[in-house]
Image (cartoon, rainbow, N blue to C red):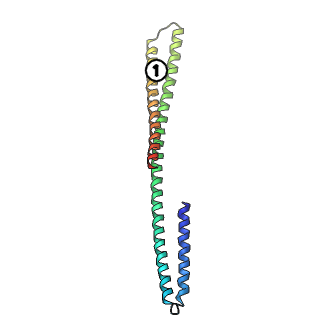
Amino acid sequence: MSQVEELESRITSALDRIAKGVDALGGSVEAADPEELEKVKAELEDEKLASAQLEERIKALHEKEEARMADLKAQVDTQAETLSQLDDTLQRLRSANDQLRSANAALREANEQGVGEPHLINKAMLAELEALRAARAADVAESEAVLSALDDLLKAGEDA
């Protein structure tokens, strides 16, 4: 961005110098040498052409920068969504593990009392199954997050 600002300031100062030169020549145009007048006009046209080229370069740089910013924003949005999904999955895993702990504690208490409670065994098995499913979902979400990050890096490497 500093190059763009530097080019803009150079263009502005060049145009100011040209305007001052034209103003100075304005009063003495009749007395000026025709060859020198043509030379000044040619220099003015050259400066106008250079100015137009620099403005086009600045415009192209602005467009390129805007495109890069849009790409970065899309990447950030994708990563935020992936992290949100991963967080949801981890919350589900934590909840399932809490259920599993409480079911196992109840099952241990029933076994200590010598009472075999079939519904506690079923509850513990269901909690364990849910914990396994949640762990699997967390692994998948984590893998997807890693793959997404790697994909972004590969795309950046190809662009470079």
Q: Nearer the viewer, residue 113 or 129?
A: 129
Label 1 neighbour load within 10 Å: few <14, some 14-19, many 20+:
some
**From what the image shows, is residue 133 above or below residue 47?**
above
Q: Residue furthest front?
A: 35
Q: Residue furthest top?
A: 114
Q: Nearer the viewer, residue 52 or 35?
A: 35
* Residue positioned 56% across, 86% down in the render: 24
Where residue 89 appears, x then y in whole percent? Answer: 47, 32
- Give the total of numbered labels: 1
* Residue positioned 54% across, 91% down in the render: 28
The quadrant of the rendering that contains the N terminus is bottom right
**From what the image shows, is residue 133 above or below residue 21?**
above
Judged from the image, the secondary structure of the residue bearing numbered disc 1 is: helix
* Residue positioned 46% across, 71% down in the render: 52
Where residue 14 appears, x then y in whole percent? Answer: 54, 74
Left or right side of 12 for 64: left
**From what the image shows, is residue 96 above or below residue 81?**
above
* Residue positioned 50% across, 93% down in the render: 30
Q: Nearer the viewer, residue 4 or 42?
A: 42
Q: Residue furthest bottom?
A: 31
Q: Amino acid at mark 1?
A: Glu
Where residue 87 appears, x then y in whole percent? Answer: 49, 35
Where residue 128 appears, x then y in whole percent? Answer: 46, 20
Q: Which residue is mark 1?
A: 128
